[in-house]
Image: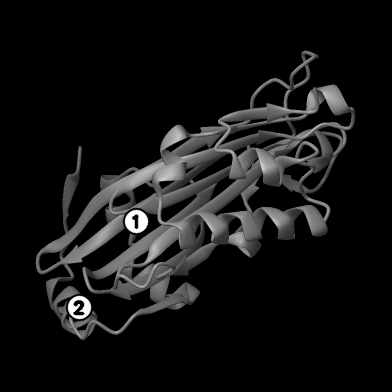
Amino acid sequence: MMSRITLTLLLFFSTILAFGQSKVLNSEMLSQQETKKIFTDRLNKQSGINYPIRRVYRCIDSSGQFFIVLTESTNVKAPRTDTLHHHIKALNFQAEKNGLIKKWEIDDSIIKQPGNDEMENSIWFWTKYTALKDIDNDGLIDPVMVYGTSGLNHTDDGRIKILTYYKGKKFAIRHQNGTLDFERNTRVDKAFYTLPVKIQEHVKLIMQKMTGDGHAIFPYGWQKAMKAHKIYFDEN
């Protein structure tokens, strides 16, 4: 259910709304200064932004202007000194004359690794694979969001989730990495195969890039499995 957030910066939002009505397709990452100007402490509290903001994208398409906010908790696990993230949340806000309307939200946390009682180490947005463009040329930006986790063997035994948003609906691909063949499996929402072919192919390209970068180990023959519209496939 959408929640309306009333802002005090009405003049500012009137300006960005008018800019968004130009219908020019565009997406950009906001600077820290721009982020703090829009997403004040008061707004963050009202909208449920509980974790530090890592990144904000401003997008403009034929629907107007919207913001995608990526947040990650900050955690340190002894004896390590590096920062880990146990929780993530992403929020999509549509800009309107009197404020922002929350359209959708991503919320996830680390879980126990399959096969043992060890918790995953960290979860974070893989912004390298984020896609914010009009993939099917219908005038609307089709967000593709990717995040994953790390375990005892870093990302080799972590989880990956690829979320595609199309006309307000979410389509997910969930993958479990594994150092051993039998540990790896991939689940695809049945509805994913109803997406325009251009979007499906774009997601597959992201999966190929993740494989090439060493961040994902998809089951052997995953391309054929997806071509056959399989909703589950593993190494068996």
Tell me the SS state at disc 2: helix
* Label 2 sits on residue: 12
Around disc 1, counting alpha carbons within 10 Å, would you say few (fewer than 14), some (14 to 19), or many (20 or more)? few
Q: Amino acid at mark 2?
A: Phe
Around disc 2, counting alpha carbons within 10 Å, would you say few (fewer than 14), some (14 to 19), or many (20 or more)? some
Q: Position of residue 190 (x, y in %)?
A: 46, 33
Figure disc tally = 2
Tell me the SS state at disc 1: helix
Q: Is residue 57 left or right of residue 124?
A: left
Q: CA distance from mark 1 to mark 2?
A: 17 Å
Q: Is residue 50 left or right of residue 221?
A: left
* Label 1 sits on residue: 41
| Contact flag, marks 1 and 2 (Cβ < 8 Å) | no
Q: Position of residue 192 (x, y in %)?
A: 45, 42
**Where is residue 14, by image quadrant?**
bottom left
Point out the frontmost of discs 1 and 2. Answer: 2
Q: Position of residue 201 (x, y in %)?
A: 56, 58
Q: Amino acid at mark 1?
A: Asp
Q: Residue at x 41, y 50 (%)?
A: 195
Please say whether residue 11 is visible from this viewpoint: yes
The answer to whether 42 is drawn above or below residue 133 in the figure is above
Q: Looking at the figure, which quarter contains the C terminus?
A: top right
The answer to whether 151 is drawn above or below residue 117 in the figure is below
Please say whether residue 75 is visible from this viewpoint: no
